[in-house]
Image (cartoon, rainbow, N blue to C red):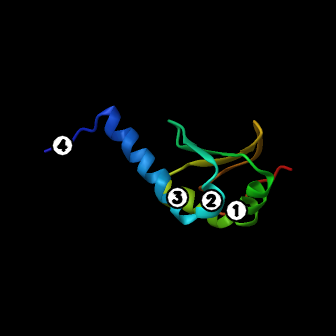
Amino acid sequence: MSIQLTYDDVQLLRQQRIDRLRKVFVKPLGLCRLQLTRRDKLVIHCPEPWIVDALMDDLDRLMEASRIVVGAQSLSICFVGEEIFRSRTLATSVEGRCA
C-alpha cells in the first residue's frame, strides 16, 4: 500500500520542518523569514545585521541542523536583499565565506 502526498501535505511538512529549525535557533531565527525552495535550498532573510553575525558565529551548527532537520542541500543567508553567505550543507567544511 502506497501513500501519496498532496501538494498541501508537502507544504505542511516543509513548514513543520522549518518550525523545528526555528526551535533550535530561537533567538536569531525568530525574526528571520525562512524559505525552503523546491530544490531544497534554505534561504534565511535576516532583517538585522546582528542576526547575520549570530548565525555566522554558529555557522557549523546551523549548516548541520539545516541538513538534518530541514533536509536542505544548501544554505543561503541574506541581508537587505543581498546574499551574504552561500554553501552546500553536505560539505564537510565551509566552502567559502563572503563578507
Whether pointer 3 and pointer 1 mark residues with C-beta atoms closer than 8 Å, the reply is no
Q: What residue did someone put label 2 on?
A: 63
Element type at mark 3? helix
Element type at mark 4? loop
Task: Say which label, 2 or 4, has the lower sequence index.
Answer: 4
- Observer-side mark, 1 or 4, equals 1
Q: Nearer the viewer, residue 2 or 22?
A: 22
Task: Say which label, 3 or 1, has the lower sequence index.
Answer: 3
What's the amino acid at mark 2? Met
Element type at mark 2? helix
**Quarter of the view holding residue 54:** bottom right
Mark 1 to mark 4: distance in Å?
Answer: 38 Å
Vertical relation: 50 (above or below) 86: below
Q: What residue did someone put label 3 on?
A: 21
Identify the residue at horizontal 38%, vertical 47% (top origin).
13
Whether pointer 2 and pointer 4 mark residues with C-beta atoms closer than 8 Å, the reply is no
Mark 3 to mark 1: distance in Å?
Answer: 14 Å
Residue 57 pos. (x, y %): 75, 65
- Observer-side mark, 2 or 4, equals 2
Return the mark for residue 59.
Answer: 1
- Observer-side mark, 3 or 2, equals 3
Task: Say which label, 4 or 3, has the lower sequence index.
Answer: 4
Mark 3 to mark 2: distance in Å?
Answer: 11 Å
- Observer-side mark, 3 or 1, equals 3
